[in-house]
Amino acid sequence: MKFLNFLATNLVVLWKRWRETSTFFMGRKKYLFSILFFVLFCLSNLTYKSLSAESKQVIQPPDGDGITIIVEKGQTLSIISKTYLDDPRKWKELLKSNQIDNPNLIIPGMKLWIPKSLGKKPLADLQRYSGKTEVLKVSRKSSDWIGATIGEGLYVKDEVRTFKDSEAQFLLLSGSRFEITENSHVIMEKGKSDIEPDELYLRKGRIRSIIQKKPSTNQRMFLLKTESAVSEVRGTDFLTEVDPSGNTILSCYEGLVAVTAQNVTVNVSSGFATFVEKGKPPLKPFSLPDPPKPKEE
């Protein structure tokens, strides 16, 4: 700081002399601009360090519930808000929660607090399970499978798997529910919006899907993908199974399911089923025996 004061004092002296005689100024022109450039450089560097230090002083609410993230290179407030809050326009609320007034203080490496009240809502909640059931929290960038917990929320890209003699039931945010049986593996692909349906991916095993009915609309309610087929639903009850070879068997107990594979679609109505061999179109629907009764919640 003393050095900067010294430079500032000399600049004032040079300025006064320049006003007294242009000859002196012409002789000191390069010297004057060199000093001026150096002063501006020092001031900008000090300002940057000050902003950096201030940006790292994030105050976490003492009784808050949420997660802390580290800002990565290339991330903007809009990107962060879209990723963690499902809405790029919520960046102002994010700043307010972190007690930051200046959006320019957001730099790579700093920590941001994401309150649970602002965060995404889960696609589904675990209602019950039996036996060994595990979840993979990809939404939290975890690579470790952990034991399932009743009431646990599942977010986009999270995965669930069951083992021998185990099963689990989940309730989707939209009101629909699904049950997975033993040795099954399902991935949360996408949550329902005003224009998009719930979307799950069945990697292996069996899933019983009971979709929330809305008779006043023809909107797609649910999309279930497998390695060999895609099932589109508008309110129904159906069972989907993926065998070890990646083939898909779909049985419809109520409503209508449109099954598509290899650009061919068949409509499977109540009491019918179809089989989709991997790499081939679905078979013509065939009759089913009596459906199994869904378990009580």
Image (spheres, rainbow, N blue to C red):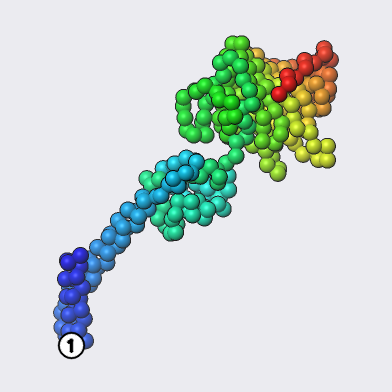
Above or below, 164 against 263 in this view is above
Residue 294: give x, y in percent of width and height: 75, 19
Q: Measuring from the top left, give residue 72's x and y in whole percent.
A: 42, 44
Q: Is residue 50 left or right of residue 121?
A: left
Instruction: Assign the C terminus to one quadrant of the image.
Output: top right
Residue 5: give x, y in percent of width and height: 19, 70
Quick check: can you spot residue 8?
yes
Quadrant of the rendered image containing residue 176: top right
Residue closest to the eye, 204 or 81 = 81
What's the residue type where badge 1 is placed?
Thr
Quadrant in which the N terminus appears: bottom left
Identify the residue at horizontal 79%, vertical 21% (top origin): 252
Residue corresponding to mark 1: 21
130 and 80: which one is in front? Answer: 130
| Image: 295 above or below 16 | above
Sort mark 1 into few (<14), some (14-19) or many (20+) by Cα contacts within 10 Å: few
User: For this rendering, which residue is in front, 45 or 267?
Assistant: 45
| Vertical comparison of 147 with 67: above or below | above
Q: Quadrant of residue 183?
A: top right
Residue 248 visible within the image: no
